[in-house]
Image: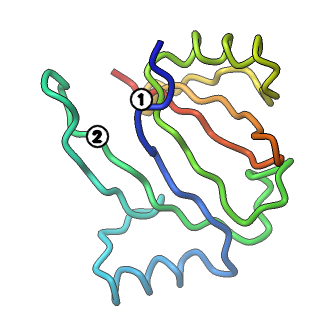
């Protein structure tokens, strides 16, 4: 079974996400949306759409990274989130929530690594 197939996003806390997005747009040329920047890359042959990695600043008081106290969270792309989540549970990995499905984006679930860092697993839609 394939597990992680790539990095889906890099999320981090900052004092002012809007100013952070503007700084990266102005000085480094990031093409920004309300969610941050999207870096597209080519998937293996046969894939219908290009893959992408998100770069997203969050407010420094966000609760989204909890229970981790870290300033960042990594989102990993996965091939089969249901099978992987079940395997992780059997391996004793802490799974924080049920798999959530969003038609436009895909499926998400959150886990903790051995140091308590929250990790978001994502199976893209389609």
Badge 2 element: strand
Task: In the rendered view, tell whether residue 89 sits above or below residue 53.
Answer: above
Judge left or right: residue 100 versus residue 112.
left
Q: Which percent across, then down, holds residue 107?
A: 53, 25
Q: State the image quarter where residue 46 is shown.
A: top left
Residue 33, x across and y down, in percent: 39, 63
The quarter of the picture where residue 112 lies is top right
Q: Which residue lies at the image location 80% right of the left edge and 55% below the top edge?
A: 63
Tag 2 near tag 1, CB within 8 Å: yes
Task: From the top left corner, tell me how far across and down residue 111 is, in percent.
Answer: 73, 34
Find numbered disc 1 in the image and state the secondary structure of the residue it sits on.
Answer: strand
Vertical relation: 89 (above or below) 21: above
Q: Residue at coordinates 75% horizontally, 52% vertically from top-left?
A: 65
Quadrant assignment for the C terminus: top left
In the figure, 103 relative to 54: above or below?
A: above
Q: How crowded is mark 2: few (under 14 residues within 10 Å), some or many (20 or more)?
A: some
Give coordinates of residue 45: x percent, y percent.
13, 26
Q: Mark 2 points at which residue?
A: 51
Mark 1: few, some, or many residues within 10 Å (few <14, many ≥20)? many
**Left or right, 39 with reference to 8:** left
Nearest the viewer among 72 and 97 is 72
User: Which circle marks residue 64 in the picture?
Assistant: none
**Residue annotated with mark 1:** 124
Distance between the alpha carbons at the discs numbered 2 and 1: 9 Å
Q: Which of the marked residues, 2 or 1, is nearer the chain's N terminus? A: 2
């Amino acid at each position: 079974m394939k597990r992680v197939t790539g990095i889906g996003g890099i999320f981090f806390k900052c004092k002012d996400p809007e100013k952070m997005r503007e700084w990266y747009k102005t000085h480094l040329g990031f093409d920004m949306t309300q969610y941050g920047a999207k870096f597209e890359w080519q998937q293996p042959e046969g894939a219908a759409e290009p893959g992408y990695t998100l770069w997203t600043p969050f407010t420094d008081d966000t609760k989204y990274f909890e229970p981790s106290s870290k300033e960042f969270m990594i989102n990993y792309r996965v091939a089969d989130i249901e099978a992987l989540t079940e395997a992780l549970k059997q391996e004793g990995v802490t799974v924080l929530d049920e798999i959530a499905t969003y038609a436009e984006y895909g499926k998400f679930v959150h886990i903790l690594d051995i140091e308590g860092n929250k990790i978001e697993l994502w199976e893209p839609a389609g």
